[in-house]
Image (cartoon, grey):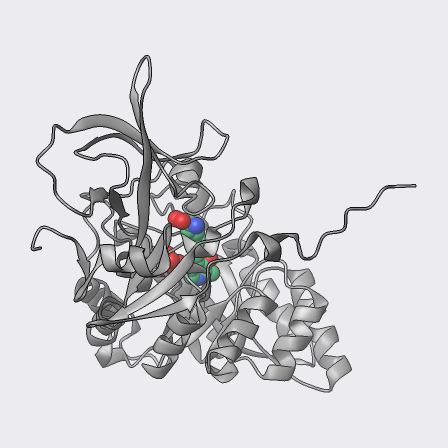
Amino acid sequence: MTDTLHCEQVPLPDLAAAYGTPLYVYSTQALTDALGHYQHAFAALNPLICYAVKANGNLSILRHFARLGCGFDIVSGGELARVLAAGGSAAKTIFSGVGKSVAEIEYALQQGVLCFNVESLPELDRINAVAARLGKTAPISLRINPDVDAQTHPYISTGLKANKFGIAFADALAAYQHAASLPHLRITGIDCHIGSQLTNLSPLVEALERLLVLVDTLAAQGIALQHIDIGGGVGIVYDNEEVPDLAAYAQAVAERLAGRKLKLMLEPGRSLVGNAGLLLTQVEFIKHGEEKDFVIVDAAMNDLLRPSLYDAHHRIEPVQQKAIAPICADVVGPICETGDFLGKARTLAVEPGDLLAIHSAGAYTASMASNYNTRPRAAEVLVHGHQHRLIRERETVAQLLAGEQACLAD
Ligand code: LLP
């Protein structure tokens, strides 16, 4: 069956038979390789690679990365709980995000996170107050908004003045001075994140250069930093995009950090998991509409939101090649929304009952899944060579209803 798609050594139809569809399928080797590319490219800089948990927080994936030496980048108390449950270390975990609650800060301080990436003055005050109450000193970095255009989709661009993220470049010195005046904070670094799915290196390098200007200004004011965190990773190939070369990125970073004593940190998410996963789905019906045809599958926007939310492209491929006439159709799910599509105008030789692989579904896919239309979330499977393991059970409708009451108001 050479014309049957596999994940590592396992034919995808075997996984569909064993676990049902829709199903997220991940390759252990691809995870290892993706991390290896970063470790290799940046080896000379000995960075701490903090995997961005939001891309895919499955415990087995976190455990795999923890074992390979990763730290983690988290944006909620829930993500910290995931890291700890997976055997990750709080001491290698950085806490990002614009709206950290008092309870989350307390939890992170008690667990001993490596650093809080702080995004505003009120957040500095809040962390200082919680640390004072607990009798602790909180390590902090300020996330600077460098105002560079990441040249990506506006919803995932984060480093422009108009975005909610970070502290404005012009306000940074005053913010650091304020932080230095708070007794329960310890300033350790500086960070930024300008956006995701970056296909061009120059905005990343420009952001780094702007941060280094600040590092020097701060040093002149007596505020010496120990680390610089340059944010997320590079974009991945979904279709036919050109993506930045990691070696070139590492080289550009090395040149700019040369002669400095700054520890380098990175927070890649998508590029560590995106192309290590696919979403396996089965064709329910083929519907010939008046204007176009539809391949209706059992996965939907609740399982893969990216096409609906960002108009993102994911390659869709039949699991078995068939010698039948292809049709050009939109691949859609069963959800009652016109926006529920997984691919538009795809040429596919498929029949009802066939399996489709929706590629590049390792990042921001299972982690963005919802229960819309009371659809239980799909199972997740991790493949390793000939072996496969269920790493998240398929949700049941009973689980979805469990927290609800059928009450009358009176
Ligand atoms: N660090 C911070 C502070 C972030 O906000 C993000 C992503 C990352 C790191 C990881 O960036 P990456 O290496 O994955 O580019 N849901 C969207 C992506 C949103 C990304 C938000 N922040 C999508 O599906 O494209």
**Which residue does the image show at 18% across and 63% down from the upper left?**
248
Q: Residue furthest bottom?
A: 135
Q: Nearer the viewer, residue 374 or 136?
A: 374
Circle count: 0
Is 370 positioned to the left or the right of 4 in the image?
Answer: right
Relative side of 276 to 245, left or right: right
Q: Residue at x 62, y 59 (%)?
A: 120
Image quadrant holding the C terminus, namely top right
Give the x, y percent position of residue 116.
56, 72
Q: Is residue 75 visible?
A: yes
Q: Residue furthest right?
A: 410
Question: Where, quadrant-wise, is the N terminus in this rendering?
Answer: bottom left
Q: Nearer the viewer, residue 6 or 160?
A: 6
- Residue at position x 35%, y 43% in the image: 152
Horizontal side of 293 relative to 311 (left or right) equals left
Judging depth in this view, the residue of 145 and 49 nearest the camera is 49
Q: Residue at x 76, y 51 (%)?
A: 405
The one nearer the camera, 148 or 93, is: 93
Q: Residue furthest top?
A: 290
Relative to residue 389, is residue 75 drawn left or right?
Answer: right
Picture quarter with ligand 1: bottom left
Q: Position of residue 174 (x, y in %)?
A: 60, 63
Q: Position of residue 202 (x, y in %)?
A: 27, 52
**As drawn, 198 above or below 35:** above
Horizontal and vertical percent for residue 402? 67, 57
Q: Is residue 217 visible?
A: no
